[in-house]
Structure formats: C-alpha cells, structure tokens
Image: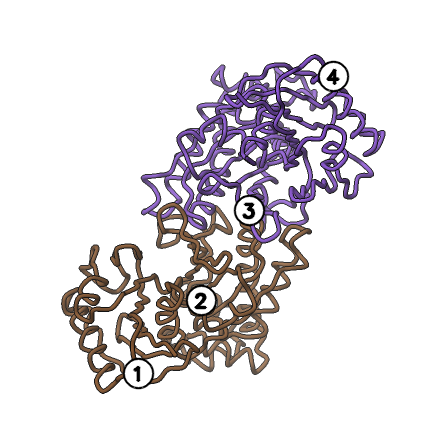
Chain colours: A brown, B purple
C-alpha cells in the first residue's frame, strides 16, 4: 500500500492528512493558517503541520499534494494572488516543502484538486471524462478528459464559474458581466436572496434568520426548503436553472456530458440537482441529451485532504 | 509532392479540387448536388465529379477528404441530418467512395474541415491551438488543440454556435435559448436587422435594399457600413459584442486564446474584428487577456475544397 500527504490550504486553517492509496485517512492534523503573517509564515505553518503529521509514522510516503485557492502553476509549484491571502503575489510553496521533506510535491488549484480527488477516489472509477464543479464562495471547476486533468495552453482551463450565462447580467468580481459565479457563488447568492426576501415577507426564511444577514447561509435556505417553503425552493430551483444553462454551453463546446457537483452549496440536494438536470436536458444539443449526467460528488468530508493527496497518486 | 482530393459538399453544388500538399489547387470541377434526389443521387454525383477531376491526372493521389454539413461520424464516414438535405437520416458517404476509388476517405463536418484547413494550409503554421469559428447561415466551430482536432467523448465537440450568451434570450433552432447562433447566424441576424430597420428610417441600408428582405445580406450591411452608415456600423459592432462574449466563455473554460474567424459574415472586416477584440479583452479572465487573439481566416476562396483536402494531409 502506498501513502501520500494531502494538504488542504484554507484561509483560516490548514488541514493535513496521511492518505492511503485506497482513499483512507490514516491520520490528520489541523493548524492555523495565519495568512495575515504573510507567505513565509504560512509555509512555515504547513511545514510544522506536516512535521507533526509524520511524527511517529514509519510508512513510506510517496509525496505531498497541496490544494489551494488562487491561480496555481503546477509545473513550478507557485500560487498567485489567492483570495484572502493578502500580500501574496506569486509564491512558490512547492520548492520549500520538497526541500524540507525530500519528497515530490504537487501543487494544484483547489477545484482541480477536487476533480482529481473524484477521479482517483470517487466517481472517477466509473467516468473517464467529467467536469467537476465546486459550489462555494465562488464557483470552481476542473475538466478531466480521459483520466487526465485538462490544463489548456497555459494551465488556466476549467474556469466554469466564468462562463457567461447573460452577457448583460450583473457584474462579476472578475471584471466581466453575467458569469455563472455572479449568480451561483455564495457571496452573490446570499446578496440576491437577501434582496428578494423583502418581497417575500411570508417566507419561513425570514423567521429563521430574524433580519440577520450573516445567518442567511445555504444551510438556512435548505432548512426552509426542507420544510416546504416556496420561496426557498424557488431560490434553489432558480440556481439550478443557471447552473444547467452554463453546463449546456460546456457540453456543447467540449462534448463532456458528466458533471460532478461538490462544495457546500451542493448540499441543497435533490431540488437543486433535479433543476440542473431538467435545464441541462432542455438546453443541450439533441445528440448529447441521452448522455447528460449531473451527479453529486462522492467525496464529502475531507474532500480537500483527499483531493490534495490524490494529486500524488494521479501524478504517478 | 503529395496530392489529395478535397470535396466541399454544399446544398446546391459540390465543389471538388485536386490539392497539393503545399495548398495549391491544381484542378477543380463543380457539379450540381441534386439534394432533392436523395442520398444515392448525391453520392453518385460526387463519384461523377471526382471521376471527372481525375480524368487525365497521372499524379499519385493520397486520399479523398469530404467536408459536409450535419453531424458527421468521422470514424465510420457517416453524415446525419445535414440541413437542406431532406430525407437523409444517417448516410455513409465514406464507404462507397473509398470502394469506388480505392483510396482512404476522410469525412468531416464542414466547420471541422475549415479548422483543419487553417491548421494545415493557413494560420496553423503559427498557432498550435485555436478555435475556428465559421460565420455563415449558422455558426460553426472546430477546436484544435496541439495540432489535433478535439472531438470530445463522442465526436460532438466544438459547437461554439450553441454556447449561450443570454439564457433568457431568443429561441434557437437547436431548441435552447440565447445561443450565439441565435444572434450571429445569418438567418437570425437578417431577421433582427430587418426588425430594427423600421426604427432606423434614415439608414442608408433602407435605400440599398428598397424594402426587399432578400436583399438584406451581410454584403449590403457592409456596403452601408463602409459608407459610414451609423446603423449598419452599430449592427456590426453589436455582432462583435455577442461573439466576444461567447469567446470569453470559451477561453475561460478551455484556455485557448486564439480565435480564427471564417465564413461569409466574417467579411464585415475591421469594425467586426475590433468589436470582438474589445469585448473579449474586457470579459476574459485577467491572466488570459495578454494572449487573446482574434484573427481572420487565411483561407478565403476555396476554403471548402482546401479544408476538405487538408483532412487527408492531417490524417497522415
């Protein structure tokens, strides 16, 4: 049995696990990121965490995989401008770790790591090509073609969150308008639902959040929907329409028909998935329709650690 | 020097040429398609045309390439439901031709053939990866990655005309809404301009077409624009905005930054290209912006014949 270290680098905490080739987490640790301390501090914390993880471990470790936000150059191991990591321009986190631990290190964008995680440990057992979509604060994506991550000319491929669904739509943080993320990213979703709640006084959601914007999370929307609240259900259904429209564009362009959805917002469950499926099926070209599949990611808890460690097994 | 036969199968006529490996047309013939006569009649006409072309030719011919409308399965040489070829369900045009002439035969969708034509004889000398976009009655597309046509899981990739730019937009013939083609396909463009002309009585276009819908062609729009007609220019600029928005989605998803535009509507020239470039640059992710390129196809006349013959040289 082979083993790898998976590092899930988040804005608040760094989760690190020792993962076996069959996808089991043998041991895990969590350390504070201290992103405000700058790149050196963060790299130091990753080292500390890995050191702690490997203390007393005698198994042979094949390598270290790191999933992190921002624009990643996997060839040289750099991370560029990760959101919530102020002061990082371009930082090489691969090299100091490979020097410290004398292991091969793979650095990937977190959405790509999630895609590789599904490929190696999850639904990839059944599907050779798929598009991974992570629904969280933003909308991330990774394209897997014939069991390999598709990078494009310069490694920037897979930005499904920045597919336009309405070219005159609301402004997106990327500078464009009407990107999928500008509807489906949790930040945007929260704002839009907040606005609409004013016209839906009767919605159970109003009671659940009691005028507190911060409480307006996907979990609360789901709670209201589960209790049959029509407004909450319409929010989820509408989100599915937007995702389905973007997926149809993707499918028509690259003829990949399997979409795997992960991330917190995917927790909306059945009403979300059935709305996406219905929309995708109505919009994709006729010849692609019979193959269209929208699936829930198989890796749920620790998808971050597992995806990061999968980079090592995928690399071999 | 190697030679190939290129067949450009159109709804009205079949154009056939003998093309050298350096892209020169040595000889060409044109025969009527007689699509109303059904598949056997059409295949018979192709045979007749190739026979005529090769009469008296002593050079060694490597193979036959055919570019045609509709859904093509290049592996088995079938064409499915080509528009304007009524009564064709799925017809194998590859096999009867390879049997008749004892040559290898390549059958491709016309947009893919145009892409391969540019790859082998045109701008492909400079660009290894690009998206070919053909602007005609419909909007066709072919994706070239690392000097190979990208087919996707089942050969249906490249349908850039069916990328949505406004999910609540006008109905497209494919059944979806707000596809690029529903704005930029010539049929749709013509209808939209006709509607708008009523509110633009002063436009020179009104004089040029004298209330005759059939005269409202891209050539007339260009003629008016060349003479400084503001309405005609706004039509072209608006078309560029729509193409640019779709191209940004493509670029963000597959990280290919070079777009090559061919087909009749590309004849709008400079005002179209500068509007596409401006829109693409404003909408694509920052990291991709410096590489974004929108180019006019290098193959102009006989792009159909040359693209079809290029299938043979690309296949080798």
Q: Position of A16 compared to A213: left or right?
A: left
The tag on residue A135 is: 2
Q: CA distance from mark 2 to mark 3?
A: 21 Å
Q: Residue at x 37, y 63 (%)?
A: A315
Q: CA distance from mark 1 to mark 3?
A: 43 Å
Residue A101 location, quadrant: bottom left
Q: Chain of mark 3?
A: B
Q: Chain of mark 2?
A: A
Q: Chain of mark 4?
A: B
Residue position marked by numbered label 3 in the rendering: B163
Q: Name the front one of labels 1 and 4.
A: 4
Between B150 and B286, the one nearer to me in the picture: B150
| Local SS, label 3 | loop
| Local SS, label 1 | strand
Residue position marked by numbered label 1 in the rendering: A28
- In x, y percent, where is residue A32? 22, 77
Instruction: Give the position of the N terminus of chain A as an image quadrant.
Output: bottom left
Query: Upstream in the sequence, badge 2 or badge 1?
Result: 1
Query: Upstream in the sequence, badge 3 or badge 4?
Result: 4
Q: Name the front one of labels 1 and 3.
A: 1
Q: Residue at x 67, y 20 (%)?
A: B215
Instruction: Give the position of the C terminus of chain A as an image quadrant.
Output: bottom left
Residue position marked by numbered label 4 in the rendering: B52
Q: Residue furthest right?
A: B37
């Amino acid at each position: 049995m082979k083993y790898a270290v998976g590092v899930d680098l988040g804005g608040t905490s760094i989760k690190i696990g020792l993962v076996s080739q069959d996808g089991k987490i043998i041991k895990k640790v969590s350390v504070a990121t201290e992103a405000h301390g700058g790149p050196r501090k963060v790299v130091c914390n990753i080292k500390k965490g890995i050191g702690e993880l490997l203390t007393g471990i005698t198994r042979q470790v094949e390598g270290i995989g790191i999933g992190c936000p921002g624009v990643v150059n996997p060839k040289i191991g750099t991370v560029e401008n990760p959101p919530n990591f102020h002061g990082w321009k371009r930082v090489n986190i691969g090299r100091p770790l490979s020097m410290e631990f004398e292991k091969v290190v793979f650095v990937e964008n977190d959405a790509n790591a999630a895609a590789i995680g599904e490929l190696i440990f999850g639904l990839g057992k059944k599907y050779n090509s798929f598009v991974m979509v992570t629904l969280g604060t933003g909308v991330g994506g990774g394209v897997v073609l014939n069991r390999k991550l598709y990078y494009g000319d310069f490694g920037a491929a897979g930005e499904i969150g920045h597919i336009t669904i309405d070219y005159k739509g609301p402004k997106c943080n990327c500078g464009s308008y009407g990107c999928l993320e500008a509807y489906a990213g949790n930040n945007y979703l929260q704002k839009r639902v907040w606005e609409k709640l004013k016209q839906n006084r009767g919605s159970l959601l109003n009671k659940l959040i009691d005028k507190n914007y911060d409480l307006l999370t996907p979990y609360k929307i789901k709670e209201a929907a589960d209790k049959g609240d029509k407004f909450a259900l319409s929010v989820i259904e509408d989100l599915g329409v937007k995702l389905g429209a973007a997926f149809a564009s993707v499918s028509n362009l690259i003829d990949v028909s399997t979409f795997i959805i992960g991330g917190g917002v995917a927790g909306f469950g059945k009403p979300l998935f059935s709305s996406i499926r219905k929309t995708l099926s109505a919009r994709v070209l006729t010849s692609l329709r019979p193959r269209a599949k929208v699936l829930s990611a198989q890796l749920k808890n620790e998808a971050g650690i597992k995806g990061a460690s999968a980079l090592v097994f995928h690399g071999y």
